[in-house]
Amino acid sequence: MATARSHAPLAQQLLRPQVELELLIPAYNEQRRLPSTVAATVDFLAGRPWSSAVVVVDNNSADGTLDVLDRFARSPVTVHAIGCSDQGKGAAVRRGIETSSARFIGFADADNATPVETLDRVMELLRAGHGAVIASRHAPGARLDVEQSALRRGGGRLFRSLAHLSLPGVADTQCGFKFFCGPLARSIARDCRIDGFAFDVELLSRVVRAGRDVVEVPVVWHDVPGSTFSARRDGLRSMADLLRISLAR
């Protein structure tokens, strides 16, 4: 449900030290999948020339999601853990964006379904001046190594049809690997209202409305069991959110 939000600037002490790239990982009960994803991300970023940090945004997990991060206390790439009391992946990502001072910022799913090596191309495009660079499972050259179930694929086709009402030029709005120019992301995130899984569409549509472009990078993607998305619980809400986004244009 959309709620009014305060747009007052955050206190300086809530902002993390500035780096060139921050990678957010929204997490809800991800004790099992998170360690390998953070480890792979840190290993990759440690070998790259840009300064970076990983930020896990805990969305009121009831398991040991935060406990598994203790092993990264001495990581060559700083791993931050912050909380978000508002439920929903959109709320968690928005919290991460609003508390960032990075030049570029983005988010990836805790399941590591999109290869982190995709960041090489993403950073190249962001540095060239593009507003948003997103991984795509439907752009020319993309490949699905392990496909989703027939139910998820059918729901995905319906979701894409509705998403095209707001973003007719974007083939894949839901691949969980999206990166932005930092100042742009912070300026648009504060006005976003969707907390659920349709927040990607709202975020990208605001990028376009701000006069910036969205570039899709084809990826080799594989489905990983354990998604917190439930077609029964989240499907109808997501569809309703998409219609609200399209009507707000």
Image: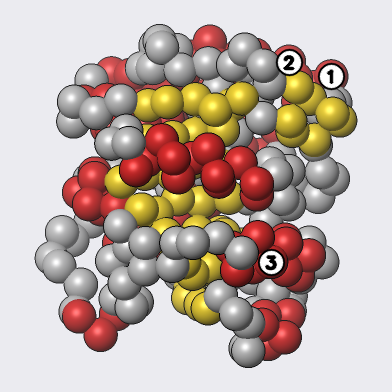
Query: In this image, 147 relative to 168: left or right?
Result: right
Which residue bears the numbered disc 1? 150
- Kindly report which numbered mark, 1 or 3, lies closer to the viewer in this rendering: 3
The picture places residue 50, in percent across and down from the top left corner, at 45, 61
Q: Secondary structure at mark 2?
A: helix
The picture places residue 85, in percent across and down from the top left corner, at 45, 69
Q: Can residue 199 be seen here?
A: no
Q: Which mark is residue 43?
A: 3
**Residue at horizontal 30%, vertical 25%?**
213
Q: Disc 1 versus disc 3: distance between alpha carbons? A: 34 Å
Give the residue type that dot 3 points to: Asp
**Residue at horizontal 60%, vertical 68%?**
46
Which residue bears the numbered disc 2? 154
Of the image marks 1 and 3, the number of the one nearer the N terminus: 3
Q: Secondary structure at mark 3?
A: helix
Q: Secondary structure at mark 1?
A: helix
Question: Where, quadrant-wise, is the N terminus in this rendering?
Answer: top left
